[in-house]
Amino acid sequence: MTSNIGTWDRTLRIVVGLALISLVFVGPQTLWGLLGLIPLVTGLARVCPAYRVAGVSTCAHDRC
């Protein structure tokens, strides 16, 4: 699979994902924080299925 997530998008997804996952351990301590797995996994894999369906790419293909 070709990557469709650029550097800034990847960084943002990883940071947001980790922040949401941290809510499981601190803060309200609900399982809603596990939703952070979605941006974390897509950021680490550099592939977003929703972007693929929509035909969107934030990746400059010469640098990804």
Image (tube, rainbow, N blue to C red):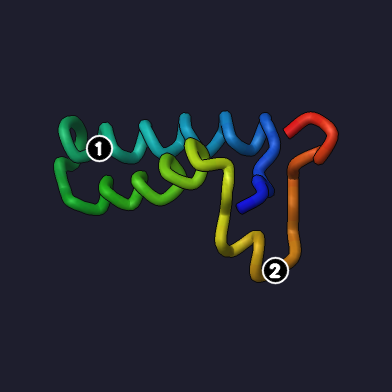
Picture quarter containing residue 17?
A: top left
Residue at the image position 65 percent from the left and 43 percent from the top: 5
Residue at mark 2: 54
* Cα distance in 3D space between marks 1 and 2: 30 Å
Residue at mark 1: 23
Percent from the top left, x then y, of residue 24?
Answer: 19, 39
- Mark 1 or mark 2: name the one nearer the start of the chain: 1
Along the line of sight, the residue nearer the viewer: 27 or 61: 61
Q: Is residue 52 left or right of residue 46?
A: right
Residue at the image position 57 percent from the left and 29 percent from the top: 11
Q: Are marks 1 and 2 in contact (CB under 8 Å)?
A: no
User: Which of pointers 1 and 2 indicates the residue nearer the eye?
Assistant: 2
Residue at the image position 74 percent from the left and 58 percent from the top: 56
- Crowdedness near tag 1: few (<14), some (14–19) or many (≥20) residues, C-alpha within 10 Å: some
Residue at the image position 84 percent from the left and 34 percent from the top: 62
Marks counted in the figure total 2
Any mark on residue 15, and which?
none
Along the line of sight, the residue nearer the viewer: 16 or 52: 52
Amino acid type, residue under disc 1 in the picture: Leu
Percent from the top left, x then y, of residue 55?
Answer: 75, 65
Q: Is residue 35 above or below residue 5?
A: below
Percent from the top left, x then y, of residue 25?
Answer: 16, 33
What secondary structure is found at the residue carrying circle 2?
A: helix
Along the line of sight, the residue nearer the viewer: 24 or 11: 11
Amino acid type, residue under disc 2 in the picture: Ala
